[in-house]
Image (tube, rainbow, N blue to C red):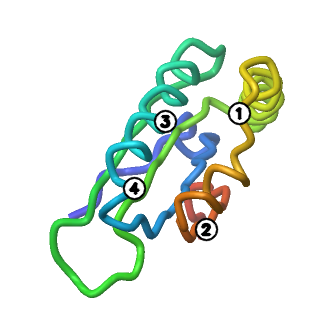
Amino acid sequence: MTSPINSESARRFFRVDKFKVPAAARAEFLSRVRAIHAFLRTLPGFVNDFILEQIRGPGAFNFVTIVIWRDKQSLASAKAAAMERHRAIGFDPAEFLRRLNIDSDFAIYAVASD
């Protein structure tokens, strides 16, 4: 049974990132993801987040992160703030993923409507 979708949750935007992380990169990956999520939690429009690790199943991606934003503008502002934060601390996400041999898939989702 699913819960009813109210108008507030229907406006939410979900950033869903999937990662295939080699075992040798797990600790460094989680450390970085936790730091990024700690920063995102401070931004206006943040609703909730999850860092999920696959424990069973045939899926190729063994980590999924989900960040829920109040609305489209909050998501856009968060993206700009995260990019600026990465620049300020000298972090290059693409280089990080390459160096650790992590495959990834990034997407934005919204609640499905009729």
Q: Can you identify the residue that label 2 sits on? A: 105
> Residue at the spot x=47%, y=21% of the render?
38
Query: Residues under labels 4 and 3: Cα distance?
Result: 11 Å
- Bin the neighbour count of mark 1 within 10 Å (Cα to Cα): few under 14, some 14-19, many 20 and up: few
> Residue at the spot x=63%, y=50% of the render?
96
**Quadrant the N terminus occupies:** bottom left
Residue type at mark 3: give it.
Arg
Q: Report which quarter residue 89 is drawn in.
A: top right
State yes or no: discs 3 and 1 in contact (Cβ < 8 Å): yes
- Discs 3/2, front: 3
Horizontal side of 18 relative to 70 (left or right) equals: left
Give the mark, 4 or 3, whose residue is nearer the N terminus: 4
Query: Residues under labels 2 and 1: Cα distance?
Result: 19 Å
State yes or no: discs 1 and 4 in contact (Cβ < 8 Å): no
| Residue 83 percent across, percent down from the top left | 80, 31
Assign a secondary structure to mark 4. helix
Q: Can you identify the residue that label 1 sits on? A: 91
Q: Can you tell which mark lies on residue 32?
A: 3
Query: Residues under labels 2 and 4: Cα distance?
Result: 17 Å
Give the mark, 3 or 1, whose residue is nearer the N terminus: 3
Give the mark, 1 or 4, whose residue is nearer the N terminus: 4
Q: Can you identify the residue that label 4 sits on? A: 25
Residue type at mark 4: give it.
Ala
Query: Residues under labels 1 and 4: Cα distance?
Result: 17 Å
Assign a secondary structure to mark 1. loop
Give the mark, 3 or 2, whose residue is nearer the N terminus: 3
Give the mark, 2 or 4, whose residue is nearer the N terminus: 4
State yes or no: discs 2 and 1 in contact (Cβ < 8 Å): no
